[in-house]
Image (spheres, coloured by chain):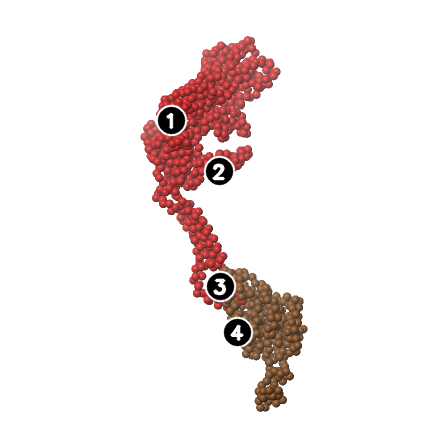
Chain colours: A brown, B red
Amino acid sequence: MARAAATATPSVIARPNRAVDRSDLFDDKFLKTLEHLHMVSRKVFAGNIRAERRTRKVGSGIEFADHRTYARGDDFRYIDWNLYGRLDKLLLRLFEEEEDLHIYILIDVSDSMSIGSPLPKLHYAMQVGAALTYVGLANLDRVAIVPFGDRVMARLPPSRGKNRIFRVFQFLRDCEIGGKTELADCMKDFVAQNKRRGLAVVISDFYDPKGFEEGINTLRYNKFEPFVLQVYDRREAEPELHGDLALVDCETGDTREVTISKSLLEQYTRAHEAYCTELETFCTKRAVPFFRTHTAIPFDELVLKIFRSGGFLR
Amino acid sequence: MSLLGPLGGSLFLWITVSAAALAVGAYIIKMRRRRFEVPFSHLWKRVLEQKDANALWKQLKRMMSLLLILLIMGIVLFAALDPTLGAIDREARSVVILIDASASMKAMDGDEAGKISRMEAARRRADDLIDSMGGGDLAMIMKVDGQATPLSRFSSDGPMLHKIIHGVTGADRTEVRAQEAERATKARAQKAAGEKSDDTPSRLLDGIQASDTPADLTRALGAAADALRDRPNPLVVLISDGAYPEQQLGLVSWDAQAPVAASADPQAKPAASAKNLAMVDLSKVDVRYMPVGRRSDNVGIIAFNVRRYIANKAAYEVYIEVQNFGTEAAHRQLALYNGDTAVDIKRIDLAPGQRIKQIYPKLPGSVDNKLRASLRPVDGPGGSDSFALDDQAYALLPARKKQKVLMVTTDNLFLEGALLVYENVDPAKLTPEQYEKNPAVADMMDVVIFDEYTPATLPPPPVSLLFFHPTGPNSPFTVRSEINGPRITEVDEGHPVMRWVTMSDVYMDKSAVFTVDAKKGESTIAYFVRDPIIVAKRDGRRKVLAFGFSLPAAGRESATDLPMRVAFPMLLVNTLDWFAGDQTDLLTTYPTGTRERVPLDGVIGATEAEVLAPDGTLTRTPVIEGLATFYGSHVGYYELAAKNPTGNTIAQIQLAANLASPGESDIAPSTELTLGGKKLEAPEAFAITHSRKIWIYLVLLAMGLIVMEWVTYHRRITV
């Protein structure tokens, strides 16, 4: 974003660097909204034991998880005799392992995220990320914030408790932003830096020239649970351009001269839609929760939608 | 097609190149791209790669805008060349159209039915000529009457030339009138401020109208030749009835005249080919003739004069001359009017070509000084004609006024008796003593006669003064000495006072001798050898005459036998007439179409005169040395007001103008005209009957293309 501003000529259509100024991002209204979201999340999981996100690991817990066939040497105290009486088969009872699960909120802070109206995508992503963090903290999950761009930026270590939220706000206001989008490399660095597995919520526009597949697969292959949240601006999907323009990539600075016509705009819109669909299809096929939103949708609506889908809260 | 635009070839090329460069430069600036930041150019690349297959078509579409602009510019530049459709098989000509507007053009035989005048027929012929002008032809309209008046510059603007010929009508006329009124107001203001002003009336308002003057063809041909000098293919077309004096038709030369070489022998005769400065050189000019008019029958008044009897100023004599110019016998009624009163009406019969003279003697005078002679039609064949202008003639009787004469004298029966005989005099008498007591009595007189008496106080002007034997320092003329027994040896016979007077044997026993100062306007009327003994002068607004000798009277020593001579009453009458400005040969009737010098006798200090014509137009003329220049363009009565430098009117004179021209009254038209021995042909038919200028259509096309370019650009068709 800063680089784009530095290279901007007087002919560049004015795009104020609003992503830099994040001072009003988490105001009182935002806090009230967060509290409301937390209330909703509590209703969704009324009756459940709080503060614990269960792993799907089988262990020595007290809660029944599954059955398996008895093998010689297994502890016969865990044989399910009721099932034997019914099925005449020896089956062993398995129990869940209780363990704290980390939530990693990975926020794309590259230059492409500084674009957007009425709100830059970055601010929107930060608000969504902060909202999810608050819900997680309120549920006594350990939540970490990891900004990334062309590299993984300094992160906010995992912490627990609602009172940590202000630290999260401050971190998001002050964190370093900018750079290109290098999703694959950043995910590799992330999985290498974070040994405790957990839920990885990736909030980005996924505008990586090298593609999104490798990055998401890296998370999957390293036992993280990816949760993909694509944020875009409506004017990126349906640009209002005309005439002879020189398109400048805000991250790379590449320039491409183009004469915008109606048919070209239609083609671009279709191409953008195809790209987003491609991402969605990829995630869906791999059972990766996927949400796509644009900045005009209030962030709390998005979060509620996420809650209703059950993908974030369990 | 012809290209008539005023731009030269190289200039046009420069303009074209500059305009094209400007258009391309503007197009390049227009094509400069705005920079726009996008978050993910990768997507745009994907899209654009698909469109590269149509790059050529895109280029062509983008070029379309530039091509349209260049096309529009080309059309506008082409329109600037003023292209005209029509084939041209000859070079452009410069044409001077001379339209005869003399008096004979008022004859109502422009068509078979006699419904239009020759002037109207000439205007229509001129219209046809203008309409048939070729693409590059330029025409100038010149009106020919007593003067040659160019009415336009050389132009191919047909509508403008038609307006000059016919005048303006409708809204245009209202507009021209408003402009005229504004100009007249401005001219009056300038004149009041002492600045130069132009109050010449517009020539546009009424078009070309026939005047009441004969045509000066020589002057018109000379003006046309001067206008056509150094112009390509010069042509003069004369539209006229051909009624010109033979003398004018001969003052044309078709050969270039070489200047006469100086001869060493001063006695040598000039060469035969010596240049006649009066001749018009038409050697390089093609002159054509378009006749108008059909009838030749006309009876007109060719002379109308009036004079007052010398002895009896109350009576006058009229002379009228009438001629039949037709080929058939004619009959008319000749009427003479004094004001509105018919003095005499009689029928006259004239054989073809006959000229008759009518004299009306001893007609009694009246209050109205306007005389008019009129020819009225009578019923029957030969009773009327188509030319009415010369059927009226106008004249004025010189103003007659009874003079108040005061004699300041002791009893002098000779003087008193002579004045009593004169009917136009209202005499009064005072003795010198009575005069001295009340000299103001003389202020109301026209003339004061001081007999053997020179007062200290003279009556103020304009009272004229007659002295017999003035003496002393109060004498109006410096008395040098007195001589005994003088004789009159020399007389200024040209002086009005000495008209019909013989004084060579008049006896005088003695006389004063005067010193004459010509610088003071003093002149000598009679000498004794070299001694002035009768002198006169104009002193400002009055006249003064002095005799150096006394008249005989009781109690006087000196004597003369002049009162016993026939010359004495004549001398007195002449003196009084001279004082009054009443000369028997003072003309008040002038021919139209000539410049005359009108004497403003007795008017001192006039620098300018305003002349009010019979048609109401007012013109100004300078007054130089007491003479005003008068040009009568219409028949009728004129009022001339002499003005001093401050603009005040100091005298008013009436004048009359008549056609009085046998040449103009002989209206027989000429179907052929010979100028300088060469018969003039009719103008050849022009190569193209009409030319069409197409620049307006080109401009409309350019405007349409501009709209198209705007639409295609803003609808993204050409981008």
- Where does the N terminus of chain A fall, quadrant-wise? bottom right
Residue A60 screen position, x and y as percent: 63, 85
Q: Residue at x 44, y 34 (%)?
A: B208
- The residue type indicated by label 4 comes to Phe
List the single residue furthest toward the front. A86
Question: Which of these two is toward me, B65 or A97?
Answer: A97
Earlier sequence position, callout 2 versus callout 1: 2
For the image, the number of numbered tags is 4
Q: Which chain letter matches label 1? A: B
The residue beneath circle 1 is: B297
- Under tag 1, what secondary structure? loop
- Alpha carbon distance from label 3 to label 4: 27 Å
Q: Is residue B397 above or below residue A307?
A: above
| Label 1 to label 4: alpha-carbon separation | 119 Å
**In the image, farthest residue toward the top:** B554
* Residue B384: image location, x then y, percent: 40, 25
Q: Which residue is mark 4?
A: A282
Which quadrant holds the C terminus of chain A?
A: bottom right
Residue placed under numbered mark 2 in the picture = B170
Q: Amino acid at mark 3?
A: Leu
**What residue is at 51 percent from the left and 12 percent from the top?**
B421
Marks 3, 4 in one chain = yes
Identify the subunit bearing mark 3: A
- Residue position marked by numbered label 3 in the rendering: A264
Q: In this rendering, does residue B380 appear at all? A: yes
Closer-to-camera residue (B85/B33): B85
Q: Nearer the viewer, mark 3 or mark 4?
A: 4
Please, what secondary structure does the residue beneath circle 2 have? helix
Q: CA distance from mark 2 to mark 4?
A: 87 Å
Q: Can you say whether A28 is above or below B392 in the image? A: below
